[in-house]
Amino acid sequence: MKVLLRSLSLCGALATPALVLRLTGAAVVPWLALLLFGAAVVAASFVLAWAAEAAQVDISGGLAIALLALIAVLPEYVVDLYFAYTAGQNPEFVAYAAANMTGSNRLLLGLGWSTVVLISLKVASRRSGRTVRELVLDPSHRTELGFLAVASVVAFVVPVSGQITLVFGLAMLGFFGFYLWKVSRAEVSEEPDLVGPAATIGALAPAVRRPLVAALFVFAAVVILLCAEPFAHALIDTGTQLGVDRFLLVQWLAPLASEAPEFIVAILFALRGNGSAAIGTLISSKVNQWTLLVGSLPLAYLIGGGSGTLALDARQVEEFLLTATQTLLGVSALLALRFPRWAAWTLLTLFAAQFALPGQEARYALCALYAAIAVAALVRNRKHIVPTFLAPFRSSPSRDLTSV
């Protein structure tokens, strides 16, 4: 218990200066704001990870992961919905909303998924004393992957039509609601293997553990909501002082700041040897972004004074298509519930390649490459396609024989 209290006290101490700065509105130089708000986001991420792990004692692992992912991705929602809302009065912000959304999605999958898998494989190899070449996911992640598979196919409507309509947005919001309902109905699995502060929380009596877990979720959510936006702005201001292009800051540095909580949580899981939970967290985050976030954009645009339909220009269509084909590759590679090392390196390499290929023709060529590798992965994993697409709609969980 002393270890838990010491850990929570440390996180509270790290978050307090940023909360005071945020609530008082005091002005500080960008680099100091970056340091203070960044420390608060990191502290909240640790608390969020402990709460989500301990919550698995009482609720299904899928719902715990979904709640973790929803809270961790809140910063991205705050930033991107602000851009979409502002675009209702200032049309140039449509580009920022699209750039921030596509940038965060590609960052999550291209950098996040691949990094977490490579760390997980390294940890597993060190523990086993032999080279581990693929991360095997728990069969329960078939449902999350199924939701992402459906969303990844439906999302191609956007680059084809060149717009994100309110009807499309409402459909995606409804699909996300169905996702939460589905994972909430999953049975609690066997008692999770907890370590550190999460183990201490999990061992508490239910009358103490459940309110504490809820309080930790609320604390993490409040800190992330209050600190993530100024963290992103401090990062942008610092980059601006260094002469970095504003569009690139909005597309990459701001998402890097807002994605920090979920990256930290997933890396913590990976370092503890729980690679399946690590990538499961990021899959759930991707479901969040590809349904709830994308679906919310036209609604925020409408509330901000827009028409309810975000019309995308050629650059934004290109960005969305690149994001959609990358997502298709990620889903295709995971159909067998195995994340091989080659897939992680491929996603990471192609993610890095986009910075060396800024031209439109080169970006469309990159889209074609993503699609070609995705088709090859689909052929290789063809027996898992139908079970994956049907997983969200099955009335009751069943043993996933295709992943054995």
Image (cartoon, helix red, strand yellow):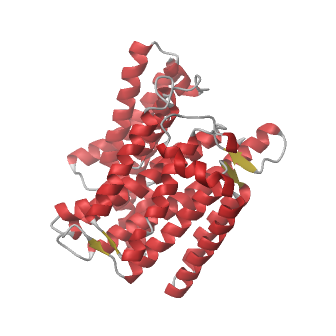
Above or below, comparing residue 333 to residue 5 in the picture? below
Q: Is residue 115 left or right of residue 8?
A: right
Above or below, comparing residue 64 to residue 87 in the picture? above
The tally of labels here is: 0
Q: In which quarter of the image is the C terminus?
A: top right
Q: In this view, does 90 lie to the left or right of 264?
A: left
In the rendering, at what x and y percent does residue 185 appear? 44, 32
Residue 143 in view (yes/no): yes
In the rendering, at what x and y percent does residue 27 appear? 25, 56
The extreme right residue here reads 130
Residue at image location 56% in from the left, 55% down from the top: 112
Comparing 230 with 154, the one in front is 154
In the rendering, at what x and y percent does residue 285 appear? 47, 50
Comparing 101 with 302, the one in front is 302
- Quarter holding residue 317: bottom left
Residue 282 in view (yes/no): no
In the rendering, at what x and y percent does residue 17 appear? 34, 42
Residue at image location 64% in from the left, 37% down from the top: 272
Q: Is residue 144 left or right of residue 234?
A: right
Residue at image location 49% in from the left, 63% down from the top: 153
